Amino acid sequence: MQIELKQPVLQKNDAMAQQLRELFAQHHVFVLDLLASPGSGKTSTILATIDALRDEFNIAVIEGDIAGSVDAKKIKDQGIPAVQINTGGACHLEADMIKRAVDVLDLKRLDLIIIENVGNLVCPTDFDLGENAKAMILSVPEGDDKPLKYPGVFQVSQAIILNKVDTMPVFNFDEEAFNASIKQLNPTASVFRIAATNGFGVEAWADWLREKIHAIQ
Ligand SMILES: Nc1nc2c(ncn2[C@@H]2O[C@H](COP(=O)(O)OP(=O)(O)OP(=O)(O)O)[C@@H](O)[C@H]2O)c(=O)[nH]1
Ligand SMILES: [Mg+2]
């Protein structure tokens, strides 16, 4: 006997995500779901994005981690509201978790919510969180072959950020092969090369996000 659990779980999630999407639209808040492996630079990229956009927009962050509140603290230390969700083992965030986090945020005064999903290139791909866009980060040390091995996450993302480009000289990363794989998997994705910790390339990424936020205001 085979029990198919995935469909009912996703249907329940999609219904809640749709409610969230309507709530976000009503308040003109742009919501970005950021996906990537552990340690690829999600929090560093969020901090760099905050630096670039904080003078123009009211920003909040929802931090998804299996345990701990290290990342939420880093965001709060910058004076930006942050809500930590601990999934207690689950490898992705779901819409009902976002609903609980959103309940403690003041949507009326926000323009942008960035969700740092749990570090994982597989599980978060299927889960709609009511976001306006999913974006993903691949960091140079992870290797240029990742689009071929984890195609789903590259296909659901409107923007693909290649982070840690400052480490290119010490890793055997074939950027041409990487770009060719992206072209094949997701030809309309916007691709950015950044080094989150020194700010290289962050401006172009922030321009993309700024345009998206303005489009829903
Ligand atoms: N050299 C270099 N290091 C970076 C860059 N971005 C992030 N790092 C470093 O990579 C490590 C992980 O960065 P985080 O931003 O914590 O990564 P994360 O994806 O949020 O990690 P988790 O939340 O634990 O999954 C830290 O030591 C960062 O300083 C970069 O552009 N260049
Ligand atoms: Mg992090």
Image (cartoon, rainbow, N blue to C red):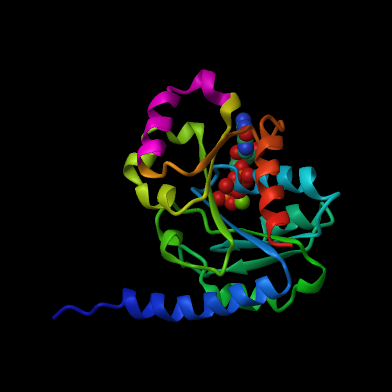
* Vertical order, 169 against 140 (above or below): above
Would residue 180 be counted in the magenta stretch? yes
User: x, y percentage for residue 24?
Assistant: 67, 71
In the rendered view of the protein, which quadrant contains the C terminus? bottom right
Please report the residue visible at 47 percent of the width from the left and 23 percent of the height from the top. 171
Would residue 3 be counted in the magenta stretch? no
User: x, y percentage for residue 50?
Assistant: 76, 48
In the rendered view of the protein, which quadrant contains the N terminus? bottom left
Please report the residue visible at 54 percent of the width from the left and 42 percent of the height from the top. 40
Query: Looking at this view, is 124 or 22 the one in front?
Result: 22
Q: Quadrant of residue 178?
A: top left
- Residue 174 can be seen in this image: no
Q: Quadrant of residue 44?
A: top right
Instruction: Give the overall secondary structure of the magenta segment.
Output: helix
Query: Looking at this view, is 35 or 75 the one in front?
Result: 35
Residues drawn in magenta: 167-184
* Vertical order, 10 against 154 (above or below): below
The number of numbered badges drawn on the structure is 0
* Vertical order, 174 against 115 (above or below): above
Please report the residue visible at 53 percent of the width from the left and 23 percent of the height from the top. 168
Please report the residue visible at 46 percent of the width from the left and 62 percent of the height from the top. 91
User: x, y percentage for residue 203?
Assistant: 71, 36
- Residue 175 can be seen in this image: yes
Left or right of residue 198, residue 67 in this image:
left
Query: Looking at this view, is 107 or 35 the one in front?
Result: 107
Q: Quadrant of residue 32?
A: bottom right
Which residue extends farthest top? 169
Report ligand 1 position as a quadrant. Answer: top right
